[in-house]
Amino acid sequence: MLTTVDAFDRIGEENAFAVLARATALVAEGRDIINLGIGQPDFRTPEHIVEAAIKALQDGHHGYTPSVGILPLREAVAHDLNRRYGVEVDPGLVMIVPGGKVTMYAAIRLFGEPGAEILYPDPGFPIYRSMIEHTGATPVPVPIREENGFAFSAEETLGLITPSTRLLIINSPANPTGGVTPKAEIDKLVKGLAAYPHVALMSDEIYDHFVFDGEKHQTLLAYPEIRDRLIILNGWSKTYAMTGWRLGYSIWPKRLYESVRKLSVNAWSCVNAATQYAGIAALDGPHDAVEAMVAEFDRRRHLVVEGLNALPGVSCATPRGAFYAFPNVQGTGWGSAKKLASALLEEAGVAVIGGPDFGVHGEGYLRLSYANSAENIRRALERMGAFLERRAAA
Ligand code: PLP
């Protein structure tokens, strides 16, 4: 039988899920594991959102919806973006999708083919590279550097563009580093892109509510000069603690919308109806639970960074966004961050992710998600400290 085995062999994975599976297996064996591996809020979805989904089911919303999502939800997305950023968004260009990853998939499928180059952040969300490779396009990593505050450099990014570049993926606030790219750098990038009209842009803004120190997220929607080639990826997973609901949205340029609408009909039909009603309640309802969650992440952020900086051989810059810390562990004597992560799980009972799982430029770092209680974070740091004292230079 002939299959496109090569294309499927090229699909990678998200190691955070493998670490989660291993941590779960260890717990089943009776081990006490503290999980700082997976990137999902340790909060329940706010009650009024859950109630909206229950009501939608009771009201009989059991059937297919338009494949691009119900209009009131697309209007709520446009309204929310207008309220928060003062930008105008046409609900006719909003697409409701089953989770943030689906926008990534659609955008990379649209532009990826053999011979095409796609730029993506490294270290960055691993699915970018995996999907680029699946399409046969050439993945071109844009290095994200600690000395640059884990922001991307506009100059370095623009310098990597060639006539074959089709798509540039950016992500701020960023997974796995917590880096936030300053507005001045984004201004510079947008200005520079004027010289490369053949390059489309996908801005992954899924952590846009998670920006600390009184700063404001800089959305790429604020630049009218690139709106005709800008794809926005966002969703409910992180902001509303809804990772398992599978609800995301994208905003597309007019010329691409119809292609992705056709893909939606072919691939997922629509997001389940009750979830879409919950999405409206999330956007239009009270945001005090979101604010409380972000404030709690902010407190934990300081706890994690202080604790990490007290560990032997570890230094950690203060992340400015998302809910991850990305400590530099080069001073521990462990040459391989993945081996260190694995030993921490097996021997110290702390699940973290090795930096190289986010790209080659992640070597020498670990990713810790602080989506866990302050108490567990303290215990995890104690365990890591004791482990590093014991196994200084393995
Ligand atoms: N983009 C980034 C940067 C992420 O970190 C994640 C999830 O961890 C996603 C997208 C995917 O979000 P979803 O779970 O809604 O598919």
Image (spheres, rainbow, N blue to C red):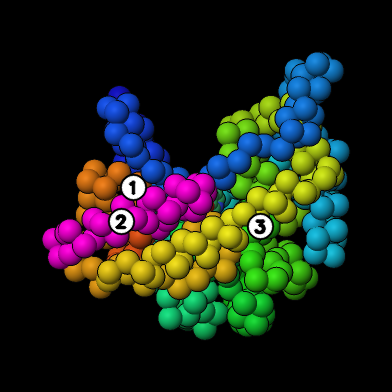
As rendered, which of 84 and 97 lies closer to the eye? 84
Question: Which range is magenta?
Answer: 367-394
**Residue at the disc numbered 1:** 350
Q: Quadrant of residue 328?
A: bottom left
Vertical side of 50 occupied by 369: above or below: below
User: Whole-percent x and y of residue 141?
Assistant: 41, 67
Q: Residue at x 81, y 22 (%)?
A: 55
Vertical side of 166 occupied by 34: above or below: above
Q: Quadrant of residue 160?
A: bottom left
Q: Quadrant of residue 16?
A: top left
Q: Is residue 260 visible?
A: no
Amino acid type for the residue under numbered disc 3: Ala
Query: 10 Å neighbourhood of mark 2: few (<14), some, or many (≥20)?
Result: many
**View extreme (left): residue:** 394
Amino acid type for the residue under numbered disc 1: Val
- Give the mark, 2 or 1, whose residue is nearer the N terminus: 1
- Given contact means CB atoms under 8 Å apart, are the residues at marks 2 and 1 in contact? yes
User: Whole-percent x and y of residue 352?
Assistant: 36, 51
Query: 10 Å neighbourhood of mark 1: few (<14), some, or many (≥20)?
Result: many
Amino acid type for the residue under numbered disc 2: Met
Q: SS for tag 2?
A: helix
Q: Is residue 32 left or right of residue 244?
A: left
Q: SS for tag 3?
A: helix
Q: Report the predominant secondary structure element of the magenta stretch.
A: helix
- Give the mark, 1 or 3, whose residue is nearer the N terminus: 3
- Circle on res. 295: 3
**Residue at the disc numbered 2:** 384
